[in-house]
Amino acid sequence: FFTYLQANCSMGETEFLAIPFNKSLHEQFCDILVCDEKSTELGIRFRPLPGNSIFWYNMNEYGEVDYLTFHAGRPPGKNGHKIGLNTWTRLNKVFIRPKK
């Protein structure tokens, strides 16, 4: 998942390219999603709000790549900046050998 730590920008959204914005479904979430005149032409876009996180699975239930999760960090705009934290999850446990 991805967490926005800092964001001083007018743009800089995280866009899920293959998930279209659906006005009737997503309009109620315009506080965290970008809802503008371009929304129905682009993928769903999450606003860079400090403290907010976006979670998704990169694989489906069969262990195959879920192409709907392809995403991109959009530029923060002129003179803007954003800082984020990626946290990777695993399907299986990670084995760590105990120290002797």
Image (cartoon, grey):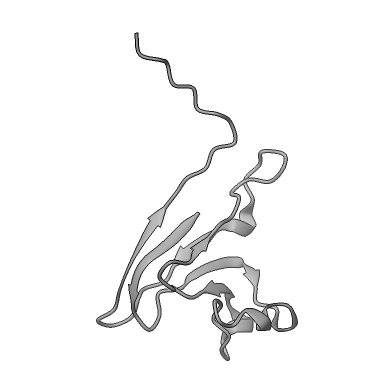
Residue 99 in the image: state x and y as whole percent.
35, 13
Quick check: 60 above or below 24? Answer: above
Q: Between 43 and 89, which is closer to the camera in this rendering? A: 89
Residue farthest along the bottom direction in this orientation: 37
Residue at (38% x, 56% y) in the render = 85
Residue 55 in the image: state x and y as whole percent.
56, 57
Residue farthest along the left direction in this orientation: 79
Say whether residue 100 is left or right of residue 32. left
The quadrant of the image that shows the C terminus is top left
Q: Between 29 and 44, which is closer to the camera in this rendering? A: 29
Residue at (56% x, 86% y) in the render = 38
Residue 41 in the image: state x and y as whole percent.
61, 81
Residue farthest along the right direction in this orientation: 24
Quick check: 29 above or below 89? Answer: below
Residue 28 in the image: state x and y as whole percent.
67, 82
Q: Which quadrant holds residue 11?
A: bottom left
Residue at (61% x, 50% y) in the render = 57
The number of discs equals 0
Residue at (49% x, 22% y) in the render = 95
Q: Which quadrant holds residue 79?
A: bottom left
Q: Between 24 and 53, which is closer to the camera in this rendering? A: 53
